[in-house]
Image: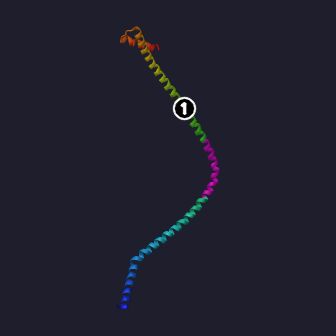
Amino acid sequence: MNLNATLVYQMIVFFILAWFTMKFVWPPLTKAIEDRRQKIAEGLAAAEKGKADLAQAQARISLMETSAKSDNHARLTDAEKQAAQIIEQARAEAEKERARILAQAQEDAAQEAQRLRDSLRGEVAVLAIAGAERILRREVDANAHAELLTQLEAEL
């Protein structure tokens, strides 16, 4: 092979590769680099703006703190008064609830006692008739039995 021909072919291939790279590869790379540079610049500008906003906010906070200290004392006393009122209301409501529960328990106990008394009256009447039946050794008819029961219930 001829050395000159090889060098010419290598130069042609090199130029084709260089043209292809400059035409198709290089523009997207430069665009990506430019976009990245622009994003970095925007980030730096945002950071500077953030620093300025932070300084303004700190200045406002220091102003607010001085005025808030005097307001805090007044707010604290108001809050203490409100807390005392709320505690008083809660105590009053708890007392009402306690009284209601106590009244309900007393009412339930009275109803239960009345129910037990009525039940006991019926049982005593039945036992009395059974005892009388055994003593007399005879059976009382149903009408007389019912009449005796109602009389005994009324008496007890």
Magenta span of residues = 60-82
Q: Position of residue 9 (x, y in %)?
A: 36, 87
**Helix, strand or loop at disc 1?**
helix
Task: Kindly identify the residue that appears in the image at 47 percent across and 24 percent down.
Answer: 112
Total marks placed: 1
Q: Nearer the viewer, residue 134 or 121?
A: 134
Q: Is residue 127 magenta?
A: no
Q: Give percent across and percent down for residue 102.
A: 53, 29
Q: Residue at x 39, y 84 (%)?
A: 14
Which is nearer the eye, 76 or 26? 26
Q: Main secondary structure of the magenta part?
A: helix
Asked where in the image residue 98 lies, by quadrant, the reply is top right
Residue 95 location, quadrant: top right
Quadrant containing the N terminus is bottom left
Q: Position of residue 75 (x, y in %)?
A: 62, 47
Q: Is residue 79 left or right of residue 11?
A: right
Q: Is residue 85 left or right of residue 150?
A: right
Residue denoted by label 1: 98
Location of residue 148 with respect to 56 vertically, above or below: above
Looking at the picture, how far across and down is residue 100, in whole percent?
Answer: 52, 30
